[in-house]
Image: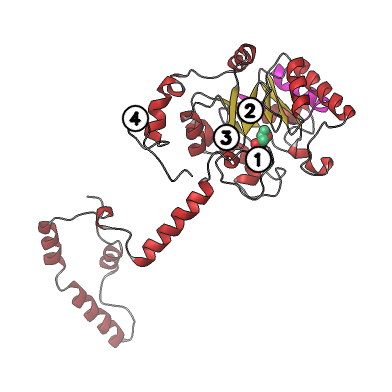
Amino acid sequence: MSTQMGTGTTGAPAGSKAEVATSSADGASRKKKVTVRTFQKMRDRGEAITMVTAYDFPTAELAEDSGIDSILVGDSLAMVILGHETTLSVTMDEMIHHAKAVRRGARTPLLVGDLPFMSYQVGPEDALRSAGRFLQEAGMDAVKLEGGRTVVPQVRAIVAAGIPVMGHIGLTPQSVHALGGWRVQGRSPEAASALLEDALALQAAGCFSIVLESVPTRLATAITERLDIPTIGIGAGPHTSGQVLVIHDLLGLFDRFQPKFVKRFALLGADARTALAAYRDEVVARTFPGPEHGYAMTDEAWAGFELETAGRGEEQRGEAQSGERNGTGRTNRTDTEGAGLDRGPDRSK
Ligand code: KIV
């Protein structure tokens, strides 16, 4: 478990930000900005492309520091961040809000904004407007949308405007109701050839890459071999050009359910619960905060404070009592004096 941190090669705790940053000097920190051309070159050289979802500044920073090639601001945030049952509920405005935070945390990975449900289905004009928002307002480098031949007009419109598009076929979560649940796709001969047709149509429409989700390994391999552009697999076996996972799944932060294709590379959810329980126990036992967590005040300053405020408590008590006696409930203090006292001590020094 990730709580049992050893010491890394740099002397910093293994996995700590310092350790990762230094060890990534060989890779991540020297890495140049990843573009769609980098994707294509990596695919052509047979180098595996790494992609992960991120939804905010800290997850984007983690991906950046780990040398991940690409970040997907996925509509999966509807489930893992916002707690919805499906991805259908997240809006374009919410996606933009999260994408902006990701942009602030990531410099080198190729940033892909995931077009949410109903931001592109109505037609190419809607699709182009939504895609444009991801680049103009949130600083994304590309967009992703779900669907095969049916979304070709949308893909063409977005690509024609100079915006790179990533396709997504197989299990397309925005169609979860039409698909009858979270099911593996393309198992029958007809369904398999339909997926290949979809992939070829997306490539012809100008997609720079296609996500293959929950399809049999041999089908994903065949589609990858027949395409000239990179495929990114999730539940599609090891032979796609690259892999993507939801960051909450791989870090063990989402445990409502676990698809077969997920590997938990850490159990941060369990670690977080242990940490929170320890914090609660120490607060209750008054062992936290300790002296090392407090701020000092010199004896001289303390003596000055005592001198200045000596008798102030008694004064106030006396005023309050006289207020009670004269029946007004108010003390004899002026408003200005009262406001001064209410403001509390000056913390600006
Ligand atoms: O939204 C998402 O996270 C995705 C990936 C699972 C590919 O679309």
Name which residue type carries label 3.
Ala
* Neighbours of disc 3 within 10 Å: few (<14), some (14-19), many (20+): many
Residue drawn at (71%, 17%) of the image = 160
- Residue under label 1, please give it: 76
Give the magenta range: 138-162
- 210 and 296: which one is in front? 210
Q: Earlier in the sequence, mark 3 or mark 1?
A: 1
| In the image: residue 81, left or right of residue 124 | left
- Residue under label 2, please give it: 243
Residue drawn at (78%, 25%) of the image = 219
How far, Cα to Cα, is label 3 from label 1?
A: 13 Å
Q: Earlier in the sequence, mark 3 or mark 2?
A: 3
- Residue under label 3, please give it: 99
The residue carrying mark 3 has its beta carbon less than 8 Å from ligand 1: no
> Viewer-nearest of labels 2 and 1?
2
| In the image: residue 27, left or right of residue 257 | left
Q: Earlier in the sequence, mark 1 or mark 4?
A: 4
> Viewer-nearest of labels 3 and 1?
1
